Amino acid sequence: MTEHPQKIVALVDGSVYSASVCDHAAWISQRTDAPVELIHVLGRRDAPEAADFSGTIKLGARTALLQELAELDAQRAKLTSHRGRAILEDARAILDKAGVNEITTRLRQGDIVEAVGEIEKDARVIMIGKRGEAADFAKGHLGSNLERIIRASTKPVFVASRAFKPISKVLVAYDGGVSAMKAIDHIARSPLFQGLQVHVVTVGTPTAEVKKGLEDAKALLKAAGLDAETSVIAGQPETALGKLIDEAQIDLLVMGAYGHSRIRTLIIGSTTTAMIRSCKVPVVLTR
């Protein structure tokens, strides 16, 4: 660990998932001594819209109406900014109550992915809710910003579930790919996972190559002081892993953001997307 721990970047939008993002950020902070930076991004759609009524209004009325519209736009922008600050203050209160020592807040304007891109160089993890403000209306969908952030981010992305519960059992979905190996390395290096039960699972056939991959993963974790279980289970990854999460009462899923795919830079791996959508526990995605 570095002398100055990298910060936990928590994205809050005022949705039902925001409190969960804060609770999970507090849990990580307490285990790693990392500061938390809370960020609310005022998207471009929140900015005042330019409207041109000039072709439909007579000249005398036009000046007065355009002035009134400009004042309304300014008022709306001010209210949006106030709301953003209120969301950040509510989030800070959750972290304060949880005993997090170092908290900063930042209100940003523009595109959320661009904002994350500028901030993430100092981050150890990016935290976001599974769904955004329309969470209750889109239970089967992932937040569009979430998909874009997972695609663009170079740091681990922690996808918070709807509500926080204490984490003691971790499942690592391991397919032998580069991002899966990075997930094992991340777990081995991070103080976050010390003392937790870790189960490394491959979905597929227990070939010699698969077994060797799991043995290597177990050895790396053991060298870091983590006593991990390994197993190979049959079935389709999203179904088999989902069943195991329920049966073994897993609290956190860790997986590579992408599997073996030549088009992985264009789309999120289908298994990854399916797991985030169906999984009731938080998911950590590594690149």
Image (tube, rainbow, N blue to C red):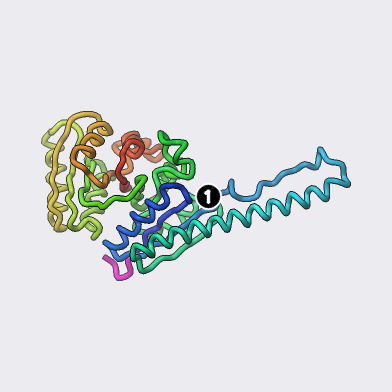
Q: Residue at x 88, y 47 (%)?
A: 60
* 67 left or right, relative to 121: right
Q: Residue at x 52, y 58 (%)?
A: 86
Residue type at the position of mark 1: Asp
Q: Residue at x 25, y 51 (%)?
A: 167
Q: Does the segment drawn in magenta span residue 37?
A: no
Q: Main secondary structure of the magenta part?
A: loop
Question: Splitting the image into 4 quarters, where does residue 266 fall?
Answer: top left
Q: Residue furthest right?
A: 60
Percent x, y for residue 187? 23, 53
Question: Splitting the image into 4 quarters, where does residue 268 fall?
Answer: top left
Percent x, y for residue 71? 73, 54
Range shown magenta = 1-5
Q: Residue at x 77, y 41 (%)?
A: 53
Q: Which quadrant holds the N terminus?
A: bottom left
Q: Residue furthest top?
A: 235
The residue that label 1 is drawn on is 111
Q: How many numbered tags mark residues here?
A: 1
Percent x, y for residue 117? 45, 54
* 97 left or right, relative to 205: right
Where 237 sits versus 76, above or below?
above
Q: Residue furthest bottom?
A: 3
Percent x, y for residue 277? 36, 37
How would you rate the neighbour count of disc 1 (Cα within 10 Å): few for under 14, some for 14-19, many for 20 or more? some
